[in-house]
Amino acid sequence: MEIKVTRTTAPLEKPLEAEKAGTLGFGNYFSDHMFLMEYDEGIGWHDARVEPYHNLSIDPAASVLHYGQEIFEGMKAYRTKEDEILFFRPLMNAARWNQSAKRMCMPTMEPEMYMEALQAVVDVDRDWTPHAYGTSLVLRPAMIALEKSLGVHPAKKYLFFIICSPSGAYYKNGMAPVSIYVEEEYIRAAAGGTGYAKCGGNYAGSMLAGEKAEEMGYDQVLWLDGVERKYIEEVGSMNMMFVIDDTIITAPLAGTILPGVTRNSILTLAADAGWKVEERKLSIDEVYQAAHEGRLNEAFGTGTAAVVSPVGKLCWRGEELVINGGKIGPKAQYLFDKLLGIQLGNSEDVYGWTKVCERKY
Ligand SMILES: *Cc1c(COP(=O)(O)O)cnc(C)c1O
């Protein structure tokens, strides 16, 4: 794939002050460049390019604005001690990208093309990857339907783009466990729906429950299955794991939850640590029952943003559970350290998960 690179003549100032002060946050700053590429029916993907970061100009009839034909990905690039930039399992994101695209009737792309696009923009903006421990360059590939038509049908024209955001460590003051509200009124996904696709609509549909949880004093929503409102699904942008006795239990990939790259990595690390791991339906009753019997030892979310996020408190039908005294448990801590170590290039990557961003552009 030929990628045309146009460098900015007016580089922005990097948020070094915010990095030093630990106030980068998530997705607040953006790098100097972006990747763009169009798709037209009958032509395929064309005009791959890296350009200065800029506004998009799209037709008000563009189908994404009316019918939400949109998908995205969430990834991070980390700076190593040797000043290399590392991607983490990018081909797994590429595979998920194509699954999301197929579900939304959008064009797929060769994983190599997805990789080359990431590689190009991150290479050009590699200096935007922050240095402080735990910080990263958050990568946001997205695709929108651009056809000028109000007809409800898959568009014939699309834009693929990638923007990069230097972001802070998720945990500024140690790993503060989050509190979670178990939602019984609203659902996120149902079998046959779009739950396994990373599409914007899934997020729009989940915000009302998020607001409700926040008003009640909780950080996040735990979704239950859409049919019986009984089985654990996942949290806003994280998969969920419970440690009952010594076993790590997480929901199976059955079409209603996002197949997390972090989920897969954590399950691998846990199994290789010799722990019992189960991917199965787990009801909220079983979680509460285990807690009452003193067998619920830990709960944590897994996702690219936080890596591992311990859950200190759960609320279901008005009953609050405090898990592991509201502190991070030993399994969550081990898995977090192990995975971040690999992502940062500090521990040996026996799985071949990381990929160095080449110096090409
Ligand atoms: C992105 C996402 C996750 C986590 O996936 P990772 O690949 O681990 O970052 C989990 N659930 C939802 C709903 C998501 O959108």
Image (spheres, rainbow, N blue to C red):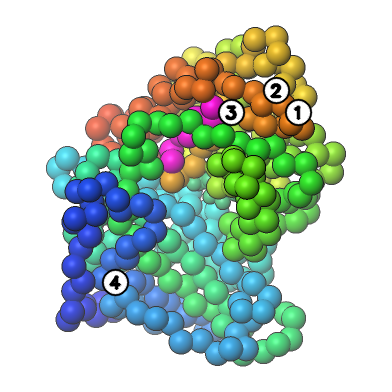
Residue at the farthest left position: 82
- Along the polypeptide, which appears first: circle 3 or circle 1? 1
- The C terminus is located in which quarter? bottom left
Check if mark 2's residue and mark 1's residue have beta carbons within 8 Å. yes
Q: CA distance from mark 3 to mark 2?
A: 13 Å
Magenta includes 309?
Answer: yes
Magenta stretch, residue numbers: 306-313
- Along the polypeptide, which appears first: circle 3 or circle 4? 4
Numbered disc 4: secondary structure: strand
- Is 3 placed left or right of 301 in the picture? left
* Residue denoted by label 4: 33
- The crowding category of the residue bearing disc 4, from other C-alpha atoms within 10 Å (few below 14, some 14 to 19, many at least 20), is many
Up the image or down, 203 lies above or below 289; here it is: below
- Along the polypeptide, which appears first: circle 2 or circle 4? 4
* Residue denoted by label 1: 283
* Residue denoted by label 3: 313
